[in-house]
Image: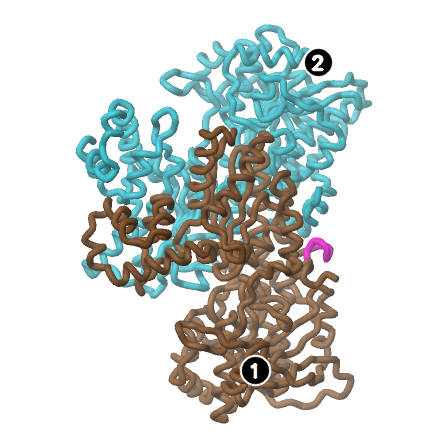
Chain colours: A cyan, B brown
């Protein structure tokens, strides 16, 4: 297989390890833990895995104890994130360090591979092909949810057949919630298999007091910031376009916020703030248009706007409109289908409640069409298909045209739109993610060696040099609370949204006025792998601010 | 101004120089030259600047001659390309090397700055801020064409006022054509000012036997290949999407071809081939759909397609349709406007000639709408707004659905679309472009020092190490021929399209079957600036193939 020079060079990179993992480790037990909320309910649902102690690994100065070989199965769950291959390489090296006869099996195309018994044994040769590379292609990933006892039992068959001692599930908040339920189930039936989770997601919304960041966030945001920076330099050279740039991340705005901290755009929208302030779509449009007008008054008819993918769902009025549309179209499908296509818009306007009707009528034709026609197999509006970046550009243009007529605005407004997502999910991991992921994998192997289940692999102190990182394990139940999901109360890991009183948002909020009115662009450029730590090993701005004193 | 670590690190980079430019240079005169075609006509139009000799700079072993200070004006013309700042830095250093009292003026926002007398003096302090950076923001660029005697005379006023000895125009084929006309004009009126051109354009279509490549092509295609590679890794991990990726470059497909050589996609369309084979849109769609079906038969419902931005205009039938539409809508604007919007499509279908009517009717609704409604101020269809990447995805889907009904195709087809252009035009220049551009600037200063006019700065032998590059000057008339432009025969620099019998296309054509059926993706990763020459200093694949024996 033909490889690029960078693929070849990265193949030789040796990830930096926390000190404890460089030698033999000993396990240090912490205090017993409680879940973040709803302790009674969580305890009742996890009688066998609740209240376990936190674990920390330290250097073991004593003699190495002889250990038996262990067999491990690994699953990649959900969307891709840079560094997944290094987690697997870390597990592999950890398993081999415990005993050379230990084996690592990879279940193919996500949790489905466990249920359907599709797997491969990961050998030295395979692992070496994938060290420090992006992508999940080593074994593939998938979105099947492990939620049913039947799936657990099917999985147990192959686990027993292969004599697997532990499963490692690499996934986001949902997958790790399911891993915890699986751990509890296997424990409850005395199945001799441990379940360990690893925190993955470029979205950055799997983090809490225990998990400082999920892997992949660092690399993905650096790739997005590279291209946004390039667009900003173009913007500042051509001086005639407003670039509306949508960034992946439906549930939280961490990606948009991190990119804003890296590139200092003129505008960045944070969905959590829009929701907290109960802003309407028109409020968002007005906010942007005012900055466009202010810059135009200085002769600067250009700028950049970062938009989180999930924005529409955070605008309370849009959420209400979408809910009513879903409900209405589900109940009136036949009637709606009979309406001639050129009358559909008017038809919907005539059927919705007053507020929603007015909002729907104000939307550009393309978006209105997406809301009423492009529905998923469950009949729901496909919010992810809505081109928010075009919607906002168009609506800001309409508002400015109106202001121009009223004499409130003088300028030219040419919007361009971009969407970045797939460009970053499988990028070659930054040194940070390469090191962090490898350490997560090695830590997972240590947790398996320690014989525990229902834990997540944890590496902390991440703004220090890798040598000073602290490896350990966190009982997954510790991060749980009860939430309503599809009408039922479920134990789940709390999803981390952007905290409006947190340091990253507060720093952004203190600067955004200056960034809006002036042109303070930073151009991060492409990720560098070879050079000084300042150039190559920096963690995300979010992490640096969160851990700043 | 806050800078990224890479901005700071790149600020310290010293571009590698051709050997001759490291010392004092002497001018070696070549043979007298002829234009590539239409020699009589070109000679008549350029009586003062036709037939000049090629120049080469070599190391001058003799004593340095005392030189007078020279003043130079520089203009950035047209679209941004990585490395423009280094051309300017090279001119600056060259001017200062000739005599410390020489001055460099930058005309602002393109040729307009010359005509309207907007300029700044470029000082050491300014230049040092921009060394090795992307963008044209040091003085801005613009698309005003220097074509009128009145503009030339206005320009001459400020040239005389600032005692400017030479103008350097950094631009593409059109701008360099205009520079040659300007040189001829100033020479014809004995104005004491030289005019020198520099070959710029990410599109790569300004090249010929004399100019091996235009600057910016290397960096831009590396940035596009980085993100396409990332998408390919995602594609190969998720195994469920077909990514349709449109790449900037309206006139030629060099960018799409170079990216294909770098990433080995499943499919890449080359406009020049589509035109040469007289392919219809349906032929292109069928070609793609057949590969999709072939891969689906192996269970591989994923892939990548690279599409040049200008494709639509190279499909002969589409060209004819657009021409008839432009003509029809120009003559029937009032009548068309009176047609209700939901009847416009049928109206147009009823009015066009048979072939065009059929083709128009076959287009997806959104594209049909773009063709009939989105017209520029001159009433022409805005071809650049047509989302070819979506158009092809949609039409391939329609064809596959038909084949599925006929039992000829079994599989799932989910297209996603991307467009990359602005992401690459202002990227931090690769070492190749940083070195090449700086050398072009230094060479321009040598041409000025040599007293010539109507030349382009030329650096050749570009696949060798920078030290062995050959610096010199090419009379611009040498690259010219007569072409019909807006109904008139004009002397212009021949635009370089992809040559279907050239080595880059031939190599691609020999491999594409294998790339289509198998998955041979290469993942180039981000541009690296610090490391071995293999990793950091490689020229484009196009250039390597063109110069291979």
**Residue lying at 27% horizontally and 33% vertically, measured from the top left:** A321
Horizontal and vertical percent position of residue B457: 61, 76
Question: In which quadrant of the rendered view does residue A113 lie?
Answer: top right
Range drawn in magenta:
B531-536
Horizontal and vertical percent position of residue B526: 61, 50
Q: Which residue is mark 1?
A: B39
Question: In what element is the residue under mark 1?
Answer: helix
Relative to the observer, which residue lies in front, A33 or B158? B158
Circle 1 crowding by C-alpha within 10 Å: few under 14, some 14–19, many from 20? some
**Residue lying at 40% horizontally and 81% vertically, measured from the top left:** B148
Relative to the observer, which residue lies in front, A334 or B120? A334
Q: Is residue A11 left or right of residue B236?
A: right
| Above or below: residue B138 compared with residue A81 | below
Horizontal and vertical percent position of residue A207: 51, 31
Relative to the observer, which residue lies in front, B421 or A153? B421
Circle 2 crowding by C-alpha within 10 Å: few under 14, some 14–19, many from 20? some
Residue closest to the far top:
A189
Mark 2 or 1: the one toward you: 1
Q: Is residue B259 left or right of residue A38?
A: right
Which chain hosts label 1? B
Which chain hosts label 2? A
Q: Is residue A227 left or right of residue A195?
A: left
Q: Is residue B532 magenta?
A: yes
Q: Which residue is mark 2?
A: A163
Question: In what element is the residue under mark 2?
Answer: loop
Quadrant assignment for the C terminus of chain B? bottom right
Q: Are discs 2 and 1 located on one and the same chain?
A: no
| Above or below: residue B303 compared with residue B45 | above
Residue closest to the far bottom:
B190
């Amino acid at each position: 297989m033909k490889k690029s020079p960078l693929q070849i060079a990265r193949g030789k990179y040796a990830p930096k390890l926390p000190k404890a993992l460089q030698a033999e480790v000993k396990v240090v037990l912490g205090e017993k833990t409680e879940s973040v909320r709803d302790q009674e309910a969580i305890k009742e649902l996890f009688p066998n895995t609740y209240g376990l102690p936190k674990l920390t690994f330290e250097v073991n100065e004593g003699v190495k104890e002889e250990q038996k070989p262990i067999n491990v199965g690994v699953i990649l769950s959900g969307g891709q994130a840079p560094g997944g291959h290094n987690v697997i390489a870390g597990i592999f090296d950890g398993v081999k360090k415990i005993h050379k006869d230990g084996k690592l099996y990879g279940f193919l195309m996500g949790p489905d591979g466990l249920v359907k018994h599709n797997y491969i044994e990961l050998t030295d040769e395979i692992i070496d092909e994938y060290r420090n590379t992006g992508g999940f292609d080593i074994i593939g990933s998938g979105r099947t949810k492990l939620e049913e006892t039947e799936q657990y039992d099917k999985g147990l068959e192959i686990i027993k057949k292969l004599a697997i001692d532990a499963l490692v599930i690499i996934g986001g908040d949902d997958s790790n919630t399911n891993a915890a339920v699986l751990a509890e189930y296997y424990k409850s039936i005395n199945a001799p298999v441990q379940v360990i989770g690893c925190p993955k997601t470029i979205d950055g919304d799997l983090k809490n007091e225990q998990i400082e960041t999920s892997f992949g966030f660092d690399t993905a945001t650096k790739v997005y910031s590279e291209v946004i920076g390039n667009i900003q330099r173009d913007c500042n050279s051509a001086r005639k376009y407003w670039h509306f740039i949508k960034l992946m991340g439906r549930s939280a705005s961490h990606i948009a916020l991190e990119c804003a901290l890296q590139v200092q755009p003129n505008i960045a929208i944070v969905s959590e703030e829009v929701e907290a302030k109960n802003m309407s779509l028109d409020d968002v449009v007005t906010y942007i248009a005012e900055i466009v007008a202010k810059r135009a008054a200085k002769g600067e008819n250009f700028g950049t706007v970062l938009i989180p993918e999930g924005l529409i769902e955070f605008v309370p009025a849009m959420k209400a409109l979408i809910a009513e549309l879903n409900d209405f179209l589900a109940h009136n499908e036949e009637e709606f289908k009979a309406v001639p296509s050129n009358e559909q818009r008017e038809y919907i306007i005539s059927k919705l409640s007053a507020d929603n009707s007015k909002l729907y009528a104000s939307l550009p034709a393309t978006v209105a069409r997406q809301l009423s026609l492009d529905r998923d197999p469950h009949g729901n509006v496909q919010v992810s298909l809505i081109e928010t970046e075009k919607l906002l550009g168009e609506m800001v243009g309409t508002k400015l045209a109106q202001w121009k007529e009223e004499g409130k605005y003088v300028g030219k407004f040419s919007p361009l739109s971009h969407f970045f997502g797939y460009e970053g999910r499988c990028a070659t991991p930054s040194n940070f993610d390469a090191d962090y992921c490898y350490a997560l994998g090695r830590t997972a192997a240590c947790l398996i060696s320690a014989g525990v289940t229902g834990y997540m692999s944890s590496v902390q102190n991440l703004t220090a040099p890798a040598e000073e990182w602290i490896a350990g394990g966190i009982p997954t139940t510790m991060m749980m609370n009860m939430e309503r999901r599809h009408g039922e109360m479920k134990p789940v890991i709390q999803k981390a949204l952007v905290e409006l009183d947190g340091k990253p948002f507060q720093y952004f909020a203190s600067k955004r006025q200056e960034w809006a009115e002036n042109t303070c662009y930073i151009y991060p450029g492409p990720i560098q792998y070879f050079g000084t730590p300042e150039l190559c090993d920096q963690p995300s701005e979010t992490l640096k601010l969160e851990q700043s004193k």
